[in-house]
Amino acid sequence: MKLPHILAVDDDSSVLEALKRDLRQQYRKNYRILATTSANEALDSLKDLKKKGEEVALFVSDQRMPEMLGVDFLKQAKTLFPDAKYTLLTAYSDIEAAVRAINEVQLDYYIGKPWNPPEEKLFPVLDDLLSDWQIRHRPAFEGLKLLGYQFSPRSHELKDFLAGNLFAYQWLNVETDPDADKLLELQGLDRKALPVLLLEDGTALAQPTIQEVGEKLGLSPTAKQDIYDLAIVGAGPAGLAAAVYGGSEGLKTILIDKRAPGGQAGTSSRIENYLGFPSGLSGADLARRAITQAQRFGVEFLAPQEVTSIESKGQYKHINMADGSKVVARSILLSTGVSYHKLENESLDRFTGAGVYYGAATTEAYAFKGQPVFVVGGGNSAGQGAMYLSRTASEVTIVIRKPDLTATMSQYLIEQIEHTPNIRVLPFTEVGEGLGEERLECLVLKNTESGETQTVPAAGLFIFIGAKPLTDWIEMNIIKDEKGFIATGRDLVPYDEFKKSWKLPREPFALETCSPGIFAAGDVRVGAMNRVASAVGEGAMAVSFVHKYLAET
Ligand SMILES: Cc1cc2nc3c(=O)[nH]c(=O)nc-3n(C[C@H](O)[C@H](O)[C@H](O)COP(=O)(O)OP(=O)(O)OC[C@H]3O[C@@H](n4cnc5c(N)ncnc54)[C@H](O)[C@@H]3O)c2cc1C
C-alpha cells in the first residue's frame, strides 16, 4: 500500500532542512515526506500525485515566499487535495496573515517559527491533525459500503446514522456507480433489496434498520450494570460534558442516545466559536473526541437506543427504552436538546430524504455537485450549512423572511457568506411549494412583501429553522413551558403545580426539574442559550448538583 504524503514548502533551504529532519524523525514510518523550496514546483508535484491517485495528508507551508505567499499556495493546493490538513509556518510578524488565512483557506493551524523543541511545539499539533485526517481517510476497497438510490429516504437515514456514529463508509449510488450492481450481484441480490450495507467481513445487510446496523457494528444497545448513579438521556454537547464530568468524578454513569453522539453539534460542518479551537472544528470531530474522553473515564454509552419514558420511584429512577429494556439510576439528566421544525407543507413532505433535508448538509452535500440548492433559515446553523454546500453546489440560495441576516447570524459567518461568490441571500421570501416527480426538482418561492411567486430549479432544499424541544415523550410530571421546554431551578417558582408538588425543605438546584434528582441541561431547558459552550457548561454544572443530590439520599 502506498503511504500518504506530507508536503513541506519553505524557500529558505536551512529552515526546510530542519523541518524535513523533524518531520522524518516523527512521521517517516507512516508517511512519505516531500520537501521543496519552490511553491510552483510543489504545485507541479501535487498535480502528478493527483494523477497517480496518491494522497496528501498534510501541508506545512511557509508564509513568506518569493514565488507566492504561503496562503496563496495553500489555496491552490486545496483545489487538488481538499481533504488534507493545512498548516502555515509563520514568523511573529505574520500572525495576522495567518489568522486571516483561517477564514480564507480554512487553515487548520499556524505554527510559529522557530518550533523548537518540536516535541512541544510541532508534533502535538501535527499528531492531532494527522489523527483527524486518518479517521476520515479510508483507502479504496476497505471499510463499509452502502449501496442505494440517492433520493431514497431509507438510504439517507442510514447515511446519517453511519456518519453520526463516525463510521467511515463508501456510498455507491446504483444509478450512477457502475460497481454497485456488480457488488449486488456478487451477494446474490438485486435492486429490490436496496439499501444494502456491505460489511468488512464480506456479508451484506439488506434494508437493515439502524438498530440492526448498530448491533452489527458493535454499538451497544443494552446496559451492562443493574444500577447507575447517573443516567444521561441525550448525547449532545450537554450530555457528553455531563458524561465526562460524571465519569471522571467517580459516578457510575450511563449515556443513552437514540442516534449518535454529538447531537445537533455533531451535524455541524464547522463550529468556529468554541473556546480553544481558533481554526474551528467540525461537529463530528468534537463528538469523536468527547465520546472517547467519556469512555476513557468508564462511562457506558448506549446507542442507538431511544428513551420512551422515565419514572421516579422514590430514590430510584427508571428509564424505559423503545426495545422494552430498562435502566435504573439514582439520578437522571435530561439533555435531549431540540430538533428542527418541520416546514408544514405537504408538497415538501413527500420529498423528505429525496431532495428535502432537515439539517444534514454534511451527509448529502456531495450529491448536489454542480446543482443549485436552497437553504431555509437565517441562523448560524443555516449559515454553516450554506458554506459547506457552497463547496460542491453550483449555487446556494439562503431563503429568509427577514430583510437580512444581521439579527440572526454571527458576523463572522455573514462575512464568510459575503465573500463566497456562489452564495446569495434572498430576503423577504418563503418557500411556497416543492415540485418534482420522484425527487425535488423545483421550488415555488413567494415574496412576502409583494406576494409575487417565482418557480426556480432546485435540486436540494436544506431546512434549518426553529427549535422544538424533544420532550413530548416525557409523560411523568415534569413541568414544561407552553412550548415544551423543561423548567428548572428558579424558573419553577411561578408554577402552581410546583408549589403543590415540591416537598423538600430546600429549593431545587439551578438545573433540577420539579422532580428531585431529575435534572435538565442544554437546549432542552427553559431559557437555554443554544450554544455548544453553554450546553457543555450546563452539562458539567449538572454533575455538581447530582453529587449534592446523591449526598442527601
Ligand atoms: C448545524 C448546526 C450548527 C451549529 N453551530 C453552532 C456553532 O457554531 N456554535 C455554537 O455554539 N452552537 C452551534 N449550534 C448549536 C449547538 O449545536 C446546540 O446549542 C447544542 O448542540 C445543544 O446541545 P444539547 O446537548 O443541549 O442538545 P443536542 O445537541 O440537541 O443533543 C440532544 C441529543 O439527545 C438525543 N435524544 C433526543 N431525544 C432522545 C430520546 N428520547 N432518547 C435518547 N436520545 C435522545 C438526540 O439524538 C441528540 O443526540 C449549531 C447547531 C446546528 C444544528
Image: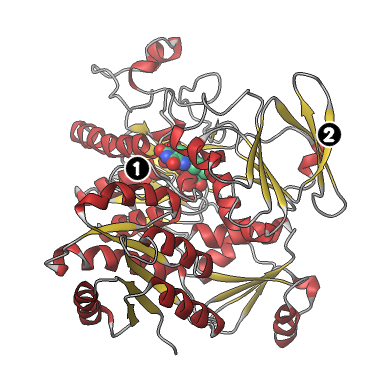
332 and 460: which one is in front? Answer: 460
Circles 2, 1 touching at the beta carbon (< 8 Å): no
Cβ of mark 1 under 8 A from ligand 1: yes
Q: Is any part of residue 336 visible from this angle?
A: no
Q: Quadrant of the N terminus?
A: bottom left
Tell me if mark 2 has few (under 14), some (14-19) or many (20+) residues whose alpha carbon lies within 10 angstroms of its own.
few
The residue positioned 57% from the left and 39% from the top of the image is 382
Question: Considering only vertical position in the picture, is 296 above or below 444?
Answer: below
Q: Could you tell me which secondary element the residue under label 1 belongs to?
A: loop
Report the residue that reaches farthest toward the front: 66
The residue positioned 25% from the left and 59% from the top of the image is 111
Q: How is the image coloured?
A: secondary structure
Q: Earlier in the sequence, mark 2 or mark 1?
A: 1
Tell me the tag on residue 67: none
Q: Quadrant of residue 397?
A: top right
Find residue 301 and report its horizontal and vertical position in percent: 39, 56
Three-letter amino acid code at the position of disc 2: Gln
175 and 57: which one is in front? Answer: 57
Tell me the tag on residue 454: 2
The residue positioned 82% from the left and 45% from the top of the image is 442
Side of 95 relative to 83 (left or right): left
Find residue 187 and report its horizontal and vertical position in percent: 70, 84
Residue designated by label 1: 274
Count the marks.
2
Find residue 172 and report its horizontal and vertical position in percent: 67, 72
Discs 2/1, front: 2
Question: Considering only vertical position in the picture, is 58 above or below 141?
Answer: above
Tell me if mark 1 has few (under 14), some (14-19) or many (20+) residues whose alpha carbon lies within 10 angstroms of its own.
some
Report the residue that reaches farthest toward the bottom: 1
Report the residue that reaches farthest toward the left: 117
Side of 12 relative to 196 (left or right): left
Q: Quadrant of the C terminus?
A: top left
